[in-house]
Amino acid sequence: MGNHLPPPKNKHVKPTKDRVAETADKVERMIRRKKLPNSEFSLRTVLPVLGALALYVLARLLKAEGMAGIASYLLPVLFAGVPVLLRAAWNALQRRFTEGDLLILIAVAGAFCLREYSAGAAAMLAYRFAELLEAFMAAHGSAALDKLKDRLPEKASVETEEGVEVVPTETVLPGDVLVVLPGEMLAADGEILEGVSSVDASFLTGESAPRDVAEGALLLSGCVNLSNMLRIKVLRPAEESAAARLVEIVELAHTNRSGRERFMSRFTNVFTPLAACVGVLVGMIPPLFDGQWLEWLHRAVLTLLIASPCGLIVSVPLTYFGSVVSAARQGIYVKGAKFMETLSKTQTMLFEKTGVITERNFTITEVFPTRGTEQELLNAANMAEASSEHPIAKALRGVCGKSEAELIQVEESPCRGISAFAGGRHICVGNAGMMMDHQISYAVPSRKGIDIHVAVDNEYLGYFLLSNKTREGAFDTIESIRQRGVKSMVMLTGDLRSSAKQIASSLSFDMVKTELNRDGKLAALEYLLAARGDRAALAFVGNGADDEELFARADAGIVLGAIEAEKAIDQADIVIMGENIESLAELMRLAKGADLSARLNIIVSLAVRLGCLALGLLGLLPMMPAILLQTAAAAACAIMALRAFIPLGNGVREKKK
């Protein structure tokens, strides 16, 4: 990286093994760490609350008076409140006097002392109802994660000296040979040693179109074999496979918290003890001046009821987690709510041309030799590109096959081409700039296309044209992203301006930067980062080929087609495994939806709590309406959070064959 650029920031340090070991109960444990009252959702916790509710309804119907009336309302409190009482006692022993359990018990006791028996019982029921809502949301998030984990195979068929042996997936080691029958999912990443088949990679990519594979192809774990038996050499342990790493991304998504989550945590940490203190002071000081002890005690009890943190925190992180899980179902893996929030604020988005806007592979369309034959020209270019993984090199190998020529002194010039000594000859392959660098006269192409010139021993052989088809759905995706608030769309490419400008114009890009090498792309990104607003964000979408520094510098780094660039899984903030560019539009929809739901959750929670607190302190709000308002707000927040787990619309359109 150039000296003028700051070092790339590490936005997601890989977790230690101890953190990775925590599995599907992470969400529930996260809620416990935030000191919420309860996070278990089962018949054992639901039945007592339902029983208490039935007793409460019966007490309302009987309308008993005297000690019988008190007992009729005390019974549902005891029936539902035993767990609260036990936790409150423990909190008191730990000198945590502002925990929700203790506050609600004091408030209920105060309501009974004020002869508000019905309101006191209703307060306990509402508190337990809010706990169950939180527990249900936590369990729903944990179950969604379990569904992803359960799809991974637990067994694998390994070739041994005695034959094929079925072993646990975690015992598979690099070098083992797996036998994968039709209908089976590959347990570890590997290279096909024998067999020709079709595979379904929908677990990874979210796209159901099958892929044809043959000997020598790299297959990632999570792919399902569809037709013929395959023998596959394992390249890495199952726990380090692509599928395991993608599930790990979803598991650890909660470690990258959004700003809204942090705000709600800070607010609760301040609001709960502050409101509790206000309640105590309200019950003790004003009556000293006006003597209206019952009235002020009523307001104090109401303040303690409102001070409970139940429902304030969990709905916001669950909203983001739901969007992360929904994205993962479609082959989009987001490394935390932080990046969902970042996308919702993105106003500038940078796109690499090759592999993002256009298809990853090039096609040789025409060959124009000035000396020798077409095949001689292509063979010479293929020899120079023999060790390269550039898409142009792959296009040449597709036509000429793998070159066996010995390469000496290979030199790549970014955005220019490559020169090498092969077969005793010095071969230069590249664009017009490459020819000018070597002072070689070249022909000017008369037809449209990406022109690649070839020279051997400083003698010009001619050129060939490449086509790089624009991805289907690219225009609609760009427009959809623009409609969701991204104001500036920028295309970055190493191509000449003449060939790149046409694509940029047809897709209505606001800016196109051409003839860029890696440092040039970094400089362009840095310039746009400096030009963005303080509250705006910048996202970069790359193909995963040598994009690590770009991913690190952008506020959100997105890789498209990671199934073809597996190393980018660890580098990008958001990993789109499939090649369908419309996944970007779906990602933006999920990010905007999650951010809107989180904002509504915060507004509803704060408006109801602060409103009830103000009205209660002024003596304008009775206890029962306050309880009903709090319960309704908790239910509304839970519904908004759970909506994030439900796919809306058609999601990512299936990629056409």
Image: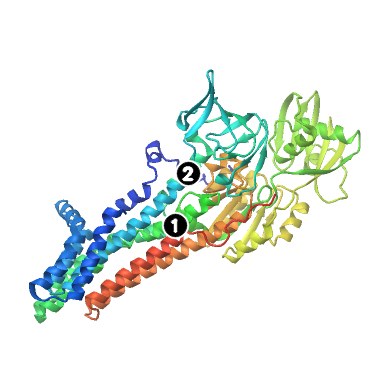
Q: Residues within 10 Å of mark 1 (few under 14, many from 20)?
A: many
Q: Answer with left or right where residue 631 lies relative to residue 71.
A: right
**Residue type highlighted by circle 2:** Val
Mark nearer the N terminus (1 vs 2)? 2
Q: Residue at x 38, y 38 (%)?
A: 21
Task: From the top left corner, tell me how far across and down residue 282 is, in percent.
Answer: 16, 73
Q: Is residue 275 visible?
A: no
Q: Residue furthest top?
A: 161
Task: From the top left corner, tell me how far across and down residue 579 is, in percent.
Answer: 64, 48
Task: From the top left corner, tell me how far across and down residue 62 is, in percent.
Answer: 17, 75
> Dot 1: what SS?
helix
In front: 250, or 345?
250
**Residue type highlighted by circle 1:** Tyr
In front: 170, or 76?
76
Q: Is residue 627 visible?
A: yes
Q: Answer with left or right where residue 653 lies relative to residue 646.
A: right
Q: Quadrant of residue 163?
A: top right
> Dot 2: what SS?
helix
Q: Quadrant of residue 22?
A: top left
Q: Answer with left or right where residue 440 lies relative to residue 244.
A: right
Numbered mark located on residue 247 in the image:
2
Numbered mark located on residue 320 in the image:
1
Q: Which numbered mark, 1 or 2, is in the foreground of this view?
A: 2
Q: Measure how far apart labels 1 and 2 are at the Cα level.
A: 16 Å
**Quadrant location of the N terminus?**
top right
Q: Residues within 10 Å of mark 2 (few under 14, many from 20)?
A: many
Task: From the top left corner, tell me how far across and down residue 124 is, in percent.
Answer: 22, 65
Q: Quadrant of residue 67?
A: bottom left
What sort of colour scheme is used for the picture? rainbow
